[in-house]
Each structure stands twice: as structure tokens, then as C-alpha cells.
Image (tube, grey):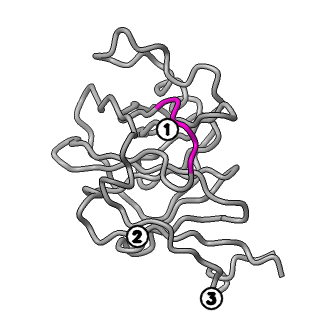
Amino acid sequence: MSDKRAAGSNPRVARVAVLTAAALAGAILFGGFVGPQKTLAFSPVPTAVTSSQLAAADAACRAPVEGYPDYPVPFAGSTLINLELFGNGGVAIYSNGVTTGACMVLVDGETAVAGIRADQVSSKEFINTGGSTEFAGQRVSMLTGVTPAGAVRVDVEGIDGAYATVVDGLYGLWLPQEIFGQNLELVLVARDES
């Protein structure tokens, strides 16, 4: 099996979403980064996290949400499926098999701070959650979703080289800009089984 785009030839792709407010209707996002102001530095190519960073991000995401005292502990009963870093920020993806959740994190060494969270979202193709917020004087956005079988990556056309890896049919990424009203398109890349 090979990913033909990685190999340099044409992959099997499906253009699935142009990012509009209507595409994300119904997503509930809450929270924001708190504590000392740090800067999010974006890289379009995701990198793996260490086990210490994964544990720190999971603990930060599951902590009670500041400013939402009546909200239950986030992601209770869900498993952390994946976390990739895009620079020093990432999106932790959770699932309990029925619903999904996501938590944007800022990772600093072996510590993490939770930001935007979306919990217990009904799984639907292709975009589950998405939204934008201000952080440290910059606009940041989070996108998560469910992909059809065979997808290995979600490319973001409009941001050179940006993509998220698909794990267990789920993906998540953050972008250093507003996602609505921009010329951005999500493209599924499927593995060639030949």
C-alpha cells in the first residue's frame, strides 16, 4: 500500500468541504487559553508528540473548564484517539464510539494548556467541529471531523502543505487564521490499495 501523493504521483482524492459557517452549524465550542500569554507557532506539517506531551495534553483537556462551573468533566468516558502538533499547538481527538470530542492545546516542552474544547459531538462526515477564537493577539481556528474508510490524510488547500493525519477515521488540526470567508478547501487523500 502506498500513499500516491507522498510517492509523487496523483493520489485518489475527494474534495469534500469548502469552509463556510453553514458547514459548521451546530458545533458547540467553548473555552479559551488561560494563564500566561504564550505564542502559538504554526507549522503546516504535523509532528508526533512524546508520551509525556500526550499525557499532559490529556490531563489539561480533561480538567474542569474555567468559566463553566456547571459543565461536567470534559471527555468523560471517551478515549484519546490522536494528537498531532502543528508547531506548538495541536488538537486532541476523543471518541467514545458514538460521539467525538476535540481539544485544542498549546504544548510547551512537556506541559500543555487546554484551549478551545468541543465535547460529545455527534459523529458525521466530514466536519464535526470548527470555530475560531483570539489567542495571544492572533486569530486561531480548530477543525475536526470523521472521514470515510480508506482516508489517510486531510489536506487543507489554501495553506501550502497543511494536512492532518487520519487515525481511526478521525482527524483534527488548528490553523493560524480565521476559517470562514477564506479560500480554504478540505481534500481527502485515500490510500491506493493497488
Q: Residue 120 colored magenta?
A: yes
Which label was assigned to residue 41?
A: none
Q: Could you tell me which residue is drawn at 26 percent across and 39 percent down?
A: 38
Q: Are marks 3 and 1 in contact (CB under 8 Å)?
A: no
Residue position marked by numbered label 2 in the rendering: 185
Residue 117 or residue 128, whichever sits in front = 128
The disc labelled 2 sits on which kind of residue? Glu
Q: Residues within 10 Å of mark 2 (few under 14, many from 20)?
A: some
Question: Where's residue 53, x and y in %?
Answer: 54, 37
Residue 24's place in the image compared with 191, above or below, is: above
Relative side of 31 to 181, left or right: right
Q: Residues within 10 Å of mark 1 (few under 14, many from 20)?
A: many
Residue found at the very far left of the displayed protein: 137
The disc labelled 1 sits on which kind of residue? Ala
- Give the quadrant of residue 95: top right
Which residues are drawn in magenta? 119-124
**Please, what secondary structure does the residue beneath circle 3 have?**
loop
Question: Where's residue 136, x and y in %?
Answer: 20, 41
- Can residue 59 be spotted in the picture? yes
Question: Where's residue 65, x and y in %?
Answer: 38, 19
The disc labelled 3 sits on which kind of residue? Asn
Residue 12's place in the image compared with 41, above or below, is: below
Residue position marked by numbered label 3 in the rendering: 10
Residue 70's place in the image compared with 161, above or below, is: above
Between disc 3 and disc 2, the foreground one is 2
In which quadrant is the N terminus drawn?
A: bottom right
- Give the quadrant of residue 192: bottom right
Residue 184 or residue 53, whichever sits in front = 184
Residue found at the very far bottom of the displayed protein: 9
Sequence-wise, the earlier of marks 3 and 2 is 3
* Magenta stretch, overall SS: strand
